[in-house]
Image: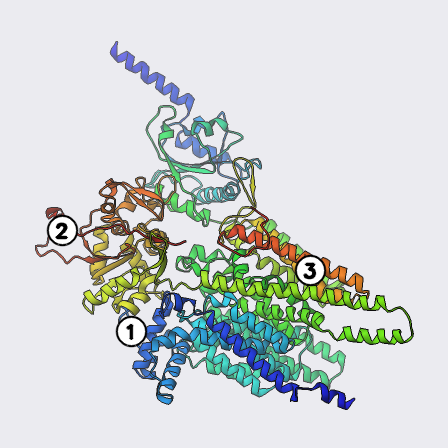
Amino acid sequence: MSTNTKLQSQVLGIPIDTIRLLLQVLIFVSVAGAAISSRLFSVIRFESIIHEFDPWFNFRATKYLVTHSFYDFLNWFDDRTWYPLGRVTGGTLYPGLMVTSGVIWHVLRDWFSLPIDIRNICVMLAPAFSGLTAIATYALTTEMKDSNAGLLSAIFMGIAPGYISRSVAGSYDNEAIAITLLMATFAFWIKAQKQGSVLYGTLTALLYFYMVSAWGGYVFITNLIPLHVFVLILMGRYNHRLYTSYCTWYAIGTLASMQIPFVGFLPIRSNDHMAALGVFGLIQLVAFGDYVKSQITEKAFKTFLVVSIASIVSLGLGGLVGLTALGWIAPWTGRFYSLWDTSYAKIHIPIIASVSEHQPTAWPAFFFDTSFLIWLFPAGIYLCFQELKDEHVFVIIYGVLCSYFAGVMVRLMLTLTPVICVCGGIAVSKLFDAYLDISDLFTGEVVEEDSKKKGSKKKPASSATIFKILSKVLVLTSFAYYLFYFVYHCTWVTSNAYSSPSVVLPSRNPDGSPTIIDDYREAYYWLRMNTPEDAKVMSWWDYGYQIGGMADRTTLVDNNTWNNTHIATVGKAMCSSEEVSYEILKKHDVDYVLIIFGGVIGFSGDDLNKFLWMIRISEGIWPDEVRERDFFTDRGEYKVDQSATETMKNSLMYKMSYYRFHDLFNGRDGIDRVRSQTIPIANAPELSVVEEAFTSTNWIVRIYKVKDLDNLGRDLKQVSAGSKTKKSRIIKKPKISLRE
Amino acid sequence: MKVSLIQLMMGVMAYAACVLGGFTNEEMLAKVKKLGGKKVFQLKENNYEEFLNGPRDYHLMLVLSSTSSQFNCPLCVEIKPDYELVANSWFQDHPNGVGASSEGKDVYFLYAEFLNAKSLFQKLQLNNIPKAYYVAPSAASAPDAWTDELEEYQFFQGVHTELISIFLGDKTGHKFNVYVPVSYSKLGWTVFIVAVVVLWLKVFFKQFKVLLSSKLLWTVLSIITILLFTSGYMFNQIRHTPYFKQNPEGAVEYFAGGQQTQYAIETQIVSFIYGILSLLFVTLVKKVPTIEHPKVKLLATGLVTISIYAIFSVLLAIFGIKSPGFPFKFFKIFG
């Protein structure tokens, strides 16, 4: 028998464990390769460029970090945003992302003498970390079942579009490294909790610290781990391992997280963190109770339990109410409310409701982002319930909670995807365990041989083997087919939906050949080259980071949205009449106004479509001066054609959007291709307080220069009425249109 | 002769005004006091002209709506109690009107139910409800002069009591407070239910404990929650999506076009499909391998795999309806 096992454990003279290790490394390399390469569509198709909006700020901050010292970076006061207020940038950002790329940059340059452009590091950071995410997912799933499930979930995680959506090359955002850290923290937590190890608890805490430094979503961990512990205690599964690991994690993790300037004392004051603190207290009590129980009789313990629970509950509730009333602990934040009471944000905080990432998720998004894993997810949860060890409880809680959050907010799809991949991995590997195990075929044959010796019927036995093989083949081929399909699905989704940098837009020439619309960069480059270095550019907040990053000009508001009033001021300037706006523009030293207009080319994400939010946000601050109702026609419609209201037609935004629009149509009525409405020539706006400075090729970006006060002290309206000299500019209608 | 003609006309007009309406402020106030709990006048076929015809020395708010089930108008049902709350709150603040000393004029609230005042709706040529109007004080006494004096209130998303108060405050210049009355019956019910639950727990604590620690219960609960949430249940809750859409021709549309939208019925269909697929999968993993007989096992395997394939095809086909560019479909099921 011993020779037999020795024989089995060697293939071609190599020990089977070595082969297994080799294969695993090979698989990891392939998984990482697949994960990275599927994120490179955007680089191949467009170029190595930072995407969207927030990444531009991160990029700018990273550049600041590598050109200044680390302490300069932490104390950075940025006077080029939020003019004239400025922003305490160093104290209001999560530095993890920038520090990571800064460290990589320094290591490559100082140790390996590889002077790589910081931009390329920023662009490639997310794909590189996605490979690590796959490995972390492997570690987590291995703790749940075995390494087979781990490898499956690693490949799922590597290519699932739900995660790719936030981690393609160029999407240099906090989430790019945060999901890696999330999975790694959870993997170490499960290890710590299983073994009751102080070492793993400390590692969990250190990764948690890294996570806190990188993403505001760390609150998710802060609540999920305590919840796990709480549920385990409720299930009567308290043990010393749990105590050791949780206390280690909580003590070190909390102290570490308080070192981040932006977080500061939040962990002991904000209600988001109270669950962790509460469970920390609870586990001390439970440990004490556990000790008492081992020392006294059961009856005495019962009395002890009732009295202590009652007093603790009343003390705790009273303390919570009292501290909140005294203002010692922060009130529940608005973002927190919008997660639970879904109509809260809509009514009270237009700035949150206006962000499309905060919209609820319709079912196609789930399927789109995870394909067939979405229906393996409940099966995986069921299989977890079948075993229900401590670590399975974790997956179940994670799964149920995150499906709720992902249903309420589209962007939380990102935190749901890992658990779907873990459950999918568990489920598929259970299937393979049951059907890929061919040993029973041979054991069956042994029985046959026995029966053959006895001379009984041979035929049904061998046909039984065929039936067995057939049923295995059937299941295996069908699921291999689904796995292939999954890869196709993911690649298609990534390539079609998530690989557009949104700074440049794909399009087609009239002859059908692909081309790109590069209006944003054209306009930002124009700003950089043609305006004074200290020019102040006003735009809606969406474009603040891009203007700061690409045009390097001072902006009034940006995507940080920390000051609602300032944003409302910009909104008011956009939606008021020229006279009112001019006063605001002058008070804020605005030199240029930048707007996005998609009416010519059919780009639906333009400022006129966001206009209602500008109105709503400024109405929140000046309800007497700005009224949403005035922008709707009598029939309650949002119109820009001949039935547009006077307020609409007089607003600066409307005028700037349609200024000289009719020249494209040879002075006849123009057609807005986004809103599919006709703009009559009678509406053709006259501008007197600003003048057109630049309009990009496809009219997407229009920049206006704010006129100076008149030298003779006249009203600017009179001045422009006096001099009707029209600037002649060749206006050509762009031939291309947006590709749907 | 001339003078007498004018006098005659004046007389006729005064008579007309008497017959056709134009309650004085005092009359209105007296009527309000006679009203019961809800301080809103219900308009009927026979009285709406009296209420609406001028001249009048007070503000009116008029809501035309119907809570009848045959119209299936959720907004109407939503708006009615809110409107009555605004009216009641106003009269709670001003039980005797604003008084002569005050700057502004009194405000009264009218409500017309379609089934009781069809001709009023016809007169205004309404083709959709609910409609809400503000009618300003006026000296015009001609019949139906009020139809030209209507200022429409726009229904927006939000807290209706608040929006109506702001609208009325804008028009009348008064400040409208909203007092939500304490619902004693609700309070009583809550106390009662809590008491019953506590008692029940006390008596059946053992059974309850068994129930709480039942793995099956928690499995079913978790899986149902996950199925609901991953098929857009919260989307329906937040967006108040319709159950499905019916074309004017009567054809029923079950699937909304586009990936960003859905109807409520889609949640049911899709969560059902996910559930069935999961169930089949679990059968395949847990139950089928335990079958001993090879033929039965093959049959069962075949049945389950083919069902998974078929249902997955249906899912892909449905997804194909939602996003027309999606290239992966096993079969062409829907067009």
Q: Chain of mark 2?
A: A
Q: Quadrant of residue B199?
A: bottom right
Q: Which mark is residue B305?
A: 3
Task: Please tell me whether residue A451 is drawn above or below residue B155 in the rendered image.
Answer: below
Q: Which mark is residue A362?
A: none
Question: Viewed as shown, does residue A116 lie left or right of A207?
Answer: left
The answer to whether marks 2 and 3 sit on the same chain is no
Q: Where does label 2 land, which residue?
A: A715
Q: Secondary structure at mark 2?
A: loop
| Residue B30 pos. (x, y %) | 46, 33
Task: Please tell me whether residue A634 is drawn above or below residue B233 in the rendered image.
Answer: above
Q: Amino acid at mark 3?
A: Thr
Q: Chain of mark 3?
A: B
Q: Residues within 10 Å of mark 1 (few under 14, many from 20)?
A: some
Q: Secondary structure at mark 3?
A: helix
The Cα–Cα distance between marks 2 and 1, rounded to whole angstroms, is 36 Å
Q: Residue at x 27, y 62 (%)?
A: A522
Closest to the camera, between mark 3 and mark 1, is 3
Res. A290 visible in picture: yes
Q: Where does label 1 land, which residue?
A: A78
Q: Chain of mark 1?
A: A
The Cα–Cα distance between marks 2 and 3, rounded to whole angstroms, is 79 Å
| Residue B319 pos. (x, y %) | 55, 53
Q: Amino acid at mark 1?
A: Asp
Q: Secondary structure at mark 1?
A: loop
